[in-house]
Image (spheres, rainbow, N blue to C red):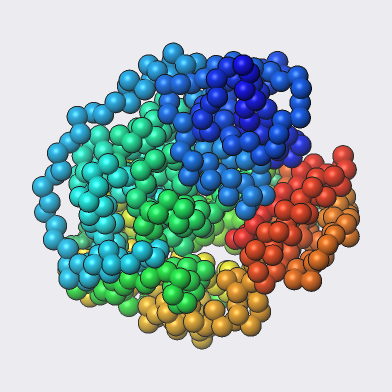
Amino acid sequence: MRHPTSVVLATPAHSGLGGPLTYTSESPLASGTLVRVPLGRRETLGIVWPAVDEPRDVDLKPIRSVLDGIAPLPDLWLQLVTFSANYYQRSIGEIALAALPPQLRDLDATQVARRLKRAAPAASGSLASRTVRPTQAQEDVLASFAADDKPALLFGVTGSGKTEVYLRAAEAMLAQQPTAQALVLVPEINLTPQLQSRFVERFGEGAVVAMHSGMTPAQRLRHWLAAHTGIARIVLGTRMAVFASVPNLKLIIVDEEHDPSYKQQEGARYSARDLAVYRGSIEHARVMLGSATPSLETWQAAQRGKYRRLELPSRIGEGALPAVRLVDMNLQPKKTVLASTLVDAIRLRASRGEQSLVFLNRRGYAPVLACNACDWKSECPNCSAYRVFHKIDRTLRCHHCGYAERVPRACPVCGNVDIAPLGRGTEQLEEHLAELLGDVRIARMDADSTRAKGSLEAQLARMHAGEVDVLVGTQMVTKGHDFRRITLVAAINADAALFSSDFRAPERLFSLLMQAAGRAGRDAQHSRASEMWVQTWHPQHPLFAALARHDYAAFAAQQLKEREQAGMPPFGFQALVRAEARTQEAAQSFLRAAAKAVQGDTSQVTLYSPVPMGIQRVANIERAQMLVECGSRRALQNFLSAWRPTLHQLRGKDVIRWAIDVDPLAI
Ligand code: ADP
Ligand code: ZN
Ligand code: ZN
């Protein structure tokens, strides 16, 4: 007997092969079973999927083999994938197969069986003796968390001991159900080792596995198997880990839930934070979202009682949050880079053996190089952007397409040798500080200085060891790190975001500055004297007033009022359709045609005209986007699902690619 069997494969979203394909198998296979099937001339990995329709194809091919050493993926996992594909307008196969460790694609049943043996538990370490006692505030939060099934927002200022709450929540869950598993999400790979070691310390080596893109294929497979077989108690990873197979999931923690890196920015543009909440609801797993500066979506959900708000209002050990000092740049001498009062403050800290952190969100030496005799600027020939001047290796580098060249000796247009940098980046700031501060030890941390493997770890270690007095960097330095000796943090040029056309820019700036401030005074001994400096041309701006009081709630209330008046998220819902083509006209006319071809009831939906994207051309490809708004999440979903086939059909050959971004973060 041959049984028709639906199988999903890794098919690109727009290949037309969106749904499951039908094969035959000799015996009925459970949904979620991993199989190898022929596809054209290749053989590929697939997942048996619940059948949607009766198979039409009469000439069905047989499944080649079944990876029967691996238990089928749980039904709830299939449900998570199906939901994600529908919600983010991608194919099920794309999301499902991307969620599996890549090495699984290349292994046959015998090889898998061998790997499974290796995933067996390393002698599960006995629970380490605990040295930390929760504070009263931590106890209260844990008790409230245990008393309610709703997703919880753990709103705790920086340094308030959120990690200890995560550890205790996991511990309580495991004490109740020894086979239970927890999923812990962190925004950045850089932050996983730190948190991982705390979980390992508490739960033992064999109980904790990591999942992120920095691991080798063999590690990823091993950790995935440990989670899937239930051996791993704690699965800790970046956004991709939200799709881990965790059959006995009882707790999901999302640390720094506001962080934009939870949203995937290519392919299937899912939000791991939002999917974590969905996953918690279908799996009856408890969800805890932690942040000192929650996303306004989450804050609003807590305000209206959808989430339960838990608070840690003060720092551990009575440490104070740093005093905020605004430097009015209007009162500084012309062309001031760093106010002299700030430089003095940094010098004083260094002389006391304390550290300072200075950040500027722009890497390289200068964002533009320009000729002083003619109009030449260091434009990228392939992009509508300037190439950045990197003095260290004397290159002009495009941060969008990667195009790099040696800095010309003279202006390529008029031959004048007087070409000079405009504006400044972290390299120049480092140089400038070195000139001003003499023998103070300065280090720089940004995407350039941390590119080589291990260099980030080395830099962090030097910082922790006190071998650096001043750390200069991009926002990379502001996230999460528990540096003990920092007593001064300075934001050099924070203003750009105040007047951005992106309605989320103030939210991002506020959270960045609060997080940055959170790096200072983490050692209660020093916290009384710690300071957060902000250089600004707009010291009267209400955002800074809220910052000075560390008043997230006031800032959120003001922003939410504006958003509500404008029908913006979280009061309205958005999607972007993006198109890329050789010409801007081709990209826009595709979007216009798609808007015209909309059918059915669209009374709830607003379609805006297509516009060029912020950086209109990248690597010689023109990019356009069209915004879709709707007052109801469900109506937007229905609209997009009905519209997607039209977009697919209308795409002419001059359109290189198009995609829908649901709940976009940057507009
Ligand atoms: P957050 O994640 O809220 O910024 P952390 O979890 O990093 O804060 O905690 C800040 C510091 O306080 C850490 O050094 C941590 O070890 C310490 N800490 C947390 N809880 C306790 C506690 N109950 N007793 C003593 N120290 C604690
Ligand atoms: Zn010139
Ligand atoms: Zn470029």
Outermost residue toward the top in this view: 110
Residue drawn at point x = 58 percent, y = 49 percent: 84
The image quarter containing residue 234 is top left
Outermost residue toward the bottom in this view: 540
Question: Which quadrant contains ligand 1?
Answer: bottom left
- Place of residue 442 in the rendered image (x, y in percent of width and height, measured from the top left): 36, 54
- Place of residue 260 in the rendered image (x, y in percent of width and height, measured from the top left): 51, 58
104 with respect to 375 (left or right): left
Image quadrant holding the C terminus, namely bottom right
401 with respect to 137 (left or right): right
370 with respect to 647 (left or right): left
Above or below: residue 525 compared with residue 384: below
Task: Name the one closer to the observer, 524 or 361.
Answer: 524
Residue drawn at point x = 26 percent, y = 60 percent: 165
- Place of residue 646 in the rendered image (x, y in percent of width and height, measured from the top left): 83, 50
Image quadrant holding the N terminus, namely top right
* Residue 217 visible in the picture: yes
Above or below: residue 279 compared with residue 315: above
Task: Name the one closer to the observer, 231 or 615.
Answer: 231
Residue drawn at point x = 86 percent, y = 52 percent: 590
Residue drawn at point x = 19 percent, y = 73 percent: 318
The image quarter containing residue 395 is top right
Task: Name the one closer to the observer, 193 or 121.
Answer: 121
56 with respect to 353 (left or right): right
- Place of residue 448 in the rendered image (x, y in percent of width and height, measured from the top left): 49, 45
* Residue 344 visible in the picture: no
